[in-house]
């Protein structure tokens, strides 16, 4: 590990109380630079990112030796473009934090029809906050689509979270997906890990505006929430396989207008009926379908209550720990596939063999599957 990388790790782990504003700024910069290392395509920087992650994990384990069960929870917000994901996350985040960046109270009140599912009278979910109170902090990772031509990304979701991005107890990071399908980037799991190792126990991941088949988000987070706009399909959309199957909660956003509220209720009703024909992701959990408005904050309190209830339920029955074990295995194999592909493409002998197979493909002499098998055989012969 280079001295620069170690310094980043020490700054991320810093927890001093003196000159708090300066410390927060330096930690934010260090976290951002660490994430940049993880996102890099440079093999040298990737290696430094691996060393940094291992360093952070070891240090945190030492610090948490007296805390056998530290709270960590990850929420994924998925949905089609235009469903209001960024605005919804800002309202939810400000409710969780209790105050905006200017110190104004943002904790919402429970509606008269809401039942108590784990939150106390002040609006703080006791199970998730673990007595943190006003010290609760969160990170938001916004995955932005990259251009298939130039490779660039606008990374504009942060501009819709103006209050949250300025909050001293929040960290908002836009991140490009670099053309990776599934709603997230190939390194998103590592970015989430850095945020939690940096002391943000609650991480919210906003996916690229995605379609029905892009479900990789569920391999990164503990709870997947599907956010829809009013009129987002009939009951047939609800029974289709894919994104609806992995949702632990479905929210119909933008239920804030006399014209939209009727459509929102209709969409919610369609999905409630459709879920009756779906095989449950978790046998003991029925995904709730709720209405919300990021504009008026309607429904945000009730949604946070349901998130608390889900976290408590999944923790008590062991499902959360089991899911995390499966996720770790998934990302091990996923990273192995990426490493094999990268190293194969960088091998001169294999590239020569691939060029020969490309000519055969262009001539119609072989199929892509046969060409891939030939290249794999060449790789295995070279390793043996």
Image (spheres, rainbow, N blue to C red):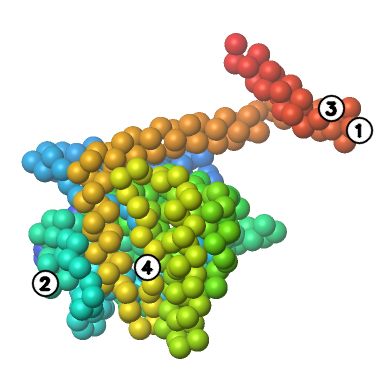
Q: Is residue 283 left or right of residue 200?
A: right
* Nearer-N-terminus badge (2/4): 2
* Nearer-N-terminus badge (2/3): 2
Q: Residue furthest top?
A: 384
Q: Quadrant of residue 224?
A: bottom left
Work out how far the residue at label 2 is from the one at label 4, CA to CA, in angstroms: 21 Å
Q: Residue at x 59, y 35 (%)?
A: 342
* Residue 121, numbered label: 2
Secondary structure type for disc 4: strand
User: Which residue is identified by label 1?
Assistant: 363
Secondary structure type for disc 2: loop
* Residue 174, numbered label: none
User: Which residue is identified by label 4?
Assistant: 290
Q: Of residues 182 and 156, which is closer to you in this image? A: 182
Asked if the residues shown at circle 2 and circle 4 are in contact, with their CB atoms under 8 angstroms apart, the answer is: no
Q: Is residue 283 above or below residue 29?
A: above
Q: Residue at x 57, y 30 (%)?
A: 340
Q: Quick one: label 3, few (<14), some, or many (20+) residues within 10 Å? A: some
User: Which residue is identified by label 3?
Assistant: 366
Q: Residue at x 45, y 45 (%)?
A: 279
* Nearer-N-terminus badge (3/4): 4
């Amino acid at each position: 590990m280079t001295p620069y990388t170690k310094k980043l790790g020490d700054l991320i782990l810093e927890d001093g109380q003196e000159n708090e504003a300066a410390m927060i700024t330096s930690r934010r910069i260090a976290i951002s630079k660490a994430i940049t290392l993880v996102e890099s395509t440079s093999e040298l920087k990737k290696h430094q990112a691996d060393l940094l992650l291992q360093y952070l994990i070891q240090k945190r384990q030492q610090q948490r030796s007296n805390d056998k069960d530290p709270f960590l929870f990850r929420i994924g917000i998925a949905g089609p473009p235009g469903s209001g994901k960024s605005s919804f996350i800002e309202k939810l985040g400000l409710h969780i934090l209790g105050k905006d960046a200017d110190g104004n109270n943002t904790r919402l009140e429970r509606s008269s029809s809401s039942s108590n599912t784990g939150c106390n009278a002040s609006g703080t979910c006791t199970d998730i906050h673990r007595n943190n109170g006003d010290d609760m902090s969160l990170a938001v990772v916004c995955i932005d689509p990259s251009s298939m031509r130039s490779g660039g990304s606008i990374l504009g979701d942060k501009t819709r979270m103006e209050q949250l991005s300025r909050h001293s107890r929040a960290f908002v990071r836009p991140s490009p997906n670099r053309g990776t399908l599934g709603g997230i980037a190939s390194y998103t799991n590592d970015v989430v890990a850095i945020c939690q190792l940096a002391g943000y126990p609650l991480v919210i991941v906003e996916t690229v505006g995605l379609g029905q088949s892009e479900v990789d988000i569920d391999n990164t987070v503990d709870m997947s929430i599907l956010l829809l706009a009013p009129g987002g399909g009939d009951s047939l959309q609800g029974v289709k396989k894919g994104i609806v199957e992995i949702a632990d909660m479905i929210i119909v956003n933008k239920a804030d207008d006399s014209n939209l509220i009727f459509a929102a209720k209709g969409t919610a009703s369609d999905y409630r009926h459709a879920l009756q024909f779906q095989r449950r992701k978790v046998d003991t959990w029925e995904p709730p379908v709720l209405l919300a408005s990021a504009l008026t904050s309607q429904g945000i309190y009730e949604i946070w209550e349901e998130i608390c209830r889900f976290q408590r339920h999944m923790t008590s029955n062991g499902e959360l720990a089991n899911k995390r074990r499966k996720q770790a295995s998934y990302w091990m194999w996923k990273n192995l596939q990426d490493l094999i592909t990268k190293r194969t493409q960088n091998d001169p002998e294999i590239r020569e063999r691939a060029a020969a197979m490309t000519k055969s493909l262009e001539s119609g002499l072989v199929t892509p599957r046969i060409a891939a098998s030939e290249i794999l055989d060449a790789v295995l012969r070279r390793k043996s």
